Image (spheres, helix red, strand yellow):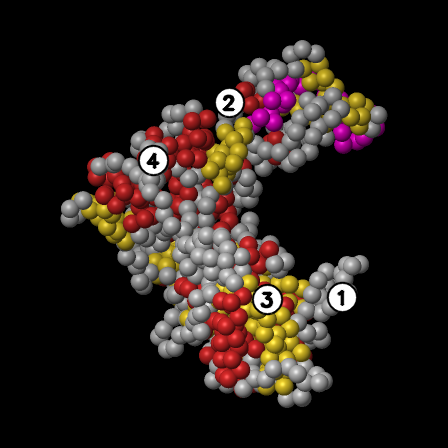
Amino acid sequence: MKVSLSWLNQYVTIGMPIGDLVEALTMVGLEIESVTDRYQYLESVIVGAVTEVKAHPHADRLKVCRVDIGEKPLSVVCGAPNVKTGQHVPLALPGTLFPDGSSLEESVIRNVASEGMICSEAELGLGTDASGVMVLDVATRLGTPLATALELEDTILEIDLTPNRPDCLSIIGVAREVAAIQKTELRYPDFGLEDSANRISEFTSVTVEAPDLCPRYSARMITGIKVAPSPFWLQDRLLSVGLRPINNIVDITNFMLMETGQPMHAFDFDQLAENRIVVKTADKGERFTTLDEKERLLTAENLMICDGEKAVGIGGVMGGLNSEIEDTTTSVLLESAYFNPISIRKTSKKLGLHTEAAHRFERGMDPEGTVKALNRASKLMAELGGGTIVPGLIDEYPAPVAPRTIPLSVADTNRLLGTHLDSQKIRDLLESIEFSTTSGEADRLDVKVPSFRVDVSRPQDLMEEVARLSGYNHIPTTFPVMPSETRKPSKLIHTRRLIRNLMGGFGFSETINYSFIGKNACDQLRLSPDDPRRKTISIVNPLSEEQTVMRTSLLPGLLSTMDRNVAKQIKTQRLFEVGKIYMEGGENSPAIESEMLATLWTGLRNDPSWHAKDRACDFFDIKGIAEGLLRGLGMKNISFTALTADLCRYTRPGFTAQVRTGSTQLGLVGEIHPQVLEHFGLKQTAYIFEFDLNCLVELRPEGKQSESLPKFPSMARDVTLIIDRGIETVSVLEHVTAQKEMLVEGVHLFDVYQGKPIPEDKKSISFRIVYRSETQTLEDEEINPLHEKISKRIIEAFDAGLPA
């Protein structure tokens, strides 16, 4: 918004340097984008005297003038009809930049050199008269810059306002802030208007059929006016803020827009059918031509100002071409209203019509300011248009907006702002911008919010006012309390970080997928009808069909990532993701959130190399990663148990294991079911494991434990047995460790064989038992009997045989 300091001075005396004013306004929230001298372009326009005027030798309508500027006479070609000898005129020298953006250069016009340009008011931006040259007082000194000769001095501030401050979209609003900064009085113009009778109802009426969209509509009528150019002072005010003068009636509405921030509209009363106003919504598909001569297609949401037969304006946005003020207008119906901000915002955006009025209405206007602005505008129209105000006022205001009173705690204000202000200081600050305050209970102030501050609705808003008015730079600098004792980091965050480090060390890349999946994802994963993961949470405004519900599993995201990578010829992939899943929590219950870890491996076991053959990864590769991760997290007693076929949903039966630690289930590891691969459009095998991260966090040991390095050597003995194919090899190994023999340090499998000469229903397994003592070097005499005892127990327990 542009603000003229000369206009601002009309309401508050500015008693501080311009630089200090700019800084002060910026510090109270009115950021100044630029400061410009309004008349700087007139430095190269000087006063000259026309000493000779003669006809142009090659053009009938042009004249060649001799202009004295006090140093030497200049030859100027001029086409103005009113230029005469003896006149003092403004002469623009080469290099002058005019308000319309054009610049003046020395030129030759019809073979005659022209060393300058004699200007009109319109060309200099000092008025609208373009009929001839601007004639100055003969007392002005030749060669004087025009701005000095006419005592033109003004500075324009460009203010970048935030959307929550519509009260400052006016000169008076900015003047109120300046008065608060300087602790001076604000001078309001006269908003009063006494009515001796109420005759306006004899001429017109207003009916509001959409009070929710137009809570207040006020109107006055002025008769016997004469439409003419505005006086210089009014034109100058509008030009100073970048508005183009039109005529005295329209200019007054624009003047009030900038002075008070209240948009207004003047209707040609004689063009209103039935001489009345009806405020209602448009019909769907209705078309309307606005003042800019463009036809608009309306909807049922658009608020329209109508007469007895037709629409004459789009409420709060722009008037219609069918009721604009013309040169023949003699009676005016002046509108001043308060419209619903949301309605105006929607209409303006839908129609692509952003006007000065809509800019203010959509941010929220002062509902109590409509009549004040209406009275002042009516008096100006009667004065400048030579008309008469019809006694009486139409004011449709069925539900007046109640004033807001907000309790404000002084202690809370100082605590949140870090200040030490007493209640009287806070009252002075708020009252400087026209808030009313009274003392309440204890340290409380009851603050009545003025109607023009639509952005203030809670104590925190008042605290912000106190902070900006007292000065942000006056708030003392404080530092947060930093306790000397150390705090343990969050176990969840630390576990996440450790998992990422471990998985990165295993050669896996982390993926981050959307928390949204398609509604058919549960079917793609072959989840059973009673699976709790089918209790998905729908998204109200989904981005696409593939993102309609919150995810209940991380696997759809990983499989989709795998699909995209395969499409780009990346066949070997090692991926993992740590993230939350979401399930319905039941009626009147919040959603259930769980954090999960999911990992996927597909393609080759090793990267292609000249010294190794390409071999595809398998179940035992992903199982080894799972074991390495759990060991890295410090977890012990990990077991992998085959999952029965009826429990395998998205993994392949016979190639799926349930992972436990003790009696706690951590998750599963296995091969993706072929049907699931088909559902996701995948053609190569993939292996996954998924763990409940909350279980990992809970079971992960807090600290690290160390053990002394063994002092004595170990001894190893191998066992080869023939057992039934249906027996899990891990159960044999667990049987050895379950015996808890003191000298048994460890046991591991190193060979499995199936085939001739082993019977078809049998398999041969070979495992090694490691023995060690912490106190001595073991001898064969000690180990052999123990090893034989352990072997017999295994043979008896599993009905095993020995190889031939």
Q: Nearer the viewer, residue 210 or 559?
A: 559
Q: Is residue 44 magenta?
A: yes
Can the viewer see residue 80? Answer: yes
Q: Which residue is mark 3?
A: 624
The reply to whether discs 4 and 3 touch (Cβ–Cβ < 8 Å) is no
Query: Residue 358 appears at what percent x and percent y?
Result: 49, 54
Where residue 448 appears, x then y in whole percent? Answer: 26, 49
Q: According to the image, label 2 marks what residue? A: 151
Q: Nearer the viewer, mark 3 or mark 2?
A: 3
Q: Is residue 66 magenta?
A: no
Q: Secondary structure at mark 2?
A: loop
Report, in whole angstroms, how far the alpha carbon at label 1 lies from the one at label 4.
64 Å
Q: Residue at x 34, y 35 (%)?
A: 478
Kind of residue at badge 2: Glu
Real-space CA distance between mark 2 and mark 1, rounded to the nearest whole angstrom:
91 Å
Tell me the magenta residue range: 39-63
Judging depth in this view, the residue of 530 and 81 nearest the camera is: 530
In the rendered image, residue 27, in percent from the top left (x then y), is placed at 41, 35
Provide the residue designation for mark 4: 478
Residue for badge 1? 614
N-term-proximal mark, 3 vs 2: 2
Is label 2 in contact with label 1 (beta carbons under 8 Å)? no
Q: Are marks 1 and 4 in contact (CB under 8 Å)?
A: no
Query: As displayed, is residue 799 above or below residue 391?
Result: below
Instruction: Tell me which amino acid carries mark 3.
Output: Gly
User: Between 172 and 24, which is closer to the camera in this rendering?
Assistant: 24
Distance of label 3 from label 1 (alpha carbons) = 19 Å
Mark 4 vs 3, N-terminal side: 4
Of tags 1 and 4, which is closer to the observer?
1
